[in-house]
C-alpha cells in the first residue's frame, strides 16, 4: 500500500538567521531552521577553509538565483525529444548511472523474464525499476506526466481527454 507522500519544500533565498551551516571537508551543508525545507549540500572545494558562513550562504543563494533563471528559461521553450532511432539515454560515468538526454522519454513497460520483476525498456536497453528510478532521480523536484499508449505509437503525441 503506498504511503502518503511527504514532500520537502524547495530551498529558497535565505539570511543567516534562517539557516544553520556546517562543514564536512570541502562540502557545506545548509539546513533551514523551518521544518520541511530541503537541505542543500554545496561542494565548494578547498576554498571552503577561507569562507565565512556568510560567504557560503552567498554562494548558496547564488545557486538558487541561477536555478530560478534556468527554470524561467525552461518554461518558455518547448520540451526536447530525441528523434527516433537516436539514443535517448546516456551513461554518466562519474555517477555510475544512466541519464535522459532530453525532456521526453519514450519507453515500454515489460517484465524481466529471469526475475518476473517489472522492467522498463528504453532504446532496446532494459532497466530494472531501481535503475529507472535512479534515472528519474536526476530530475528530482520536477513533475512528470505518464501517458500509456500502444507500443507502435510511442513517437506520436496522444490525444488526451480530461475526465473521470
Image (cartoon, rainbow, N blue to C red):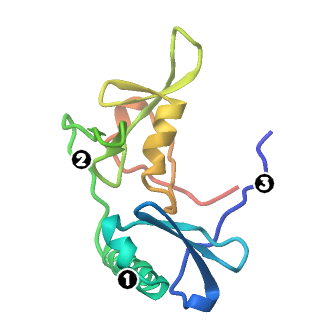
Q: Nearer the viewer, residue 127 or 65?
A: 65
Give the distance between the C-alpha atoms of the residues marked 1 and 3, in whole angstroms. 33 Å
The image quarter containing residue 164 is bottom right
Measuring from the top left, give residue 6's x and y in whole percent: 72, 60
Please say whether residue 29 is visible from this viewpoint.
Answer: yes
Nearer mark to the viewer, of 2 and 3: 3
Choose the circle earlier in sequence order: 1 or 3.
3
The image quarter containing residue 16 is bottom right
| Marker count (numbered) | 3
Give the distance between the C-alpha atoms of the residues marked 2 and 3, in whole angstroms. 34 Å
Q: Is residue 93 above or below residue 9?
A: above
Choose the circle earlier in sequence order: 1 or 2.
1
Quickly name the residue at label 3. Answer: 4
Q: Are marks 1 and 2 in contact (CB under 8 Å)?
A: no
Horizontal side of 155 relative to 107 (left or right) equals left
Choose the circle earlier in sequence order: 2 or 3.
3
At x 44% / y 84%, what residue is drawn? Answer: 52
Amino acid at each position: 500500500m503506498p504511503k502518503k507522500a511527504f514532500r520537502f519544500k524547495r530551498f529558497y533565498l535565505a539570511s543567516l538567521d534562517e539557516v544553520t551551516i556546517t562543514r564536512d571537508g570541502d562540502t557545506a551543508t545548509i539546513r533551514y531552521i523551518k521544518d520541511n525545507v530541503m537541505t542543500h549540500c554545496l561542494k565548494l572545494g578547498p576554498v571552503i577553509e577561507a569562507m565565512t558562513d556568510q560567504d557560503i550562504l552567498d554562494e548558496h543563494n547564488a545557486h538558487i538565483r541561477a536555478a530560478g533563471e534556468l527554470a524561467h528559461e525552461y518554461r518558455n521553450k518547448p520540451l526536447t525529444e530525441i528523434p527516433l532511432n537516436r539514443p535517448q539515454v546516456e551513461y554518466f560515468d562519474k555517477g555510475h548511472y544512466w541519464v535522459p538526454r532530453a525532456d521526453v522519454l519514450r519507453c515500454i513497460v515489460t517484465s524481466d523474464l529471469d526475475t518476473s520483476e517489472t522492467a522498463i525498456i528504453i532504446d532496446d536497453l532494459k532497466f530494472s525499476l531501481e535503475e529507472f528510478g535512479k534515472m528519474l532521480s536526476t530530475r528530482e523536484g520536477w513533475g512528470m506526466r505518464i501517458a500509456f499508449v500502444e507500443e507502435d505509437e510511442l513517437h506520436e503525441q496522444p490525444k488526451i481527454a480530461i475526465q473521470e
